[in-house]
Image (cartoon, grey):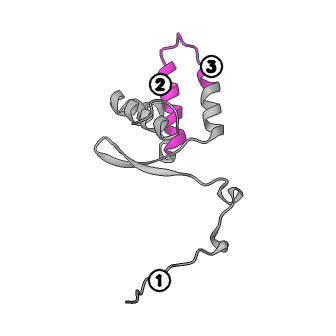
């Protein structure tokens, strides 16, 4: 009895180095207000900028949470970068909070899923 199983050889030419991955964006689709949007993982620089922004925001300011929420969403959702504060404030806060939490989780911060 002979088998016709073909084993594909892996070529060393297909191997990518870390240098080849520099600048590559990792994305996934998530649900936002009954639609799907594409979010991108935050980079190390974006996370460091976010941490700086958190430290510099006046905690007594009523816009403190909104500014952080806006930053996270605009960094991970490129099409949101041209939305004004007024546009963003027109969305339900729970929807923006869920989206921001999903971005943070996907980027390796915040609550990790089981």
Q: From mark 2 to mark 3, how far is it between C-alphas?
A: 14 Å
Q: Quadrant of the N terminus?
A: bottom left
Q: From mark 3 to mark 1, how far is it between C-alphas?
A: 58 Å
Disc 2 is placed on an element classified as helix
Disc 1 is placed on an element classified as loop
| Nearer the observer, 60 or 24 | 24
Q: Quadrant of the C terminus?
A: top left
Residue under pointer 1: 6
Quadrant of residue 95 within the rendered picture: top left
**Percent position of residue 52, x then y:** 65, 25
Q: At 59% from the left edge and 22% from the top edge, which residue is drawn?
A: 54
Disc 3 is placed on an element classified as helix
Residue under pointer 3: 55
Residue under pointer 2: 66
Between tags 2 and 3, which lies in front?
3
**Percent position of residue 96, x then y:** 39, 33
**Segment tinted magenta in the rendering:** 53-77
Between tags 1 and 2, which lies in front?
1
Q: At 57% from the left edge and 77% from the top edge, which residue is drawn?
A: 9
- Judged from this view, the residue extending furthest toward the right is 19
**Percent position of residue 87, x then y:** 41, 35
Q: Residues within 10 Å of mark 2 (few under 14, many from 20)?
A: some
């Amino acid at each position: 009895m002979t088998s016709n199983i073909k084993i594909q050889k892996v070529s060393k030419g297909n191997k990518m180095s870390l240098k080849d991955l520099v600048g590559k964006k990792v994305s996934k689709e998530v649900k936002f207000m009954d639609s799907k949007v594409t979010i991108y993982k935050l980079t190390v620089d974006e996370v460091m900028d976010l941490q700086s922004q958190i430290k510099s925001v006046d905690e007594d300011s009523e816009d403190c949470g909104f500014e952080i929420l806006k930053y996270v969403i605009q960094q991970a959702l490129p099409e949101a970068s041209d939305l004004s504060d007024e546009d963003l404030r027109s969305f339900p806060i729970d929807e923006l909070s869920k989206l921001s939490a999903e971005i943070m989780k996907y980027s390796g911060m915040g609550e990790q899923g089981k």
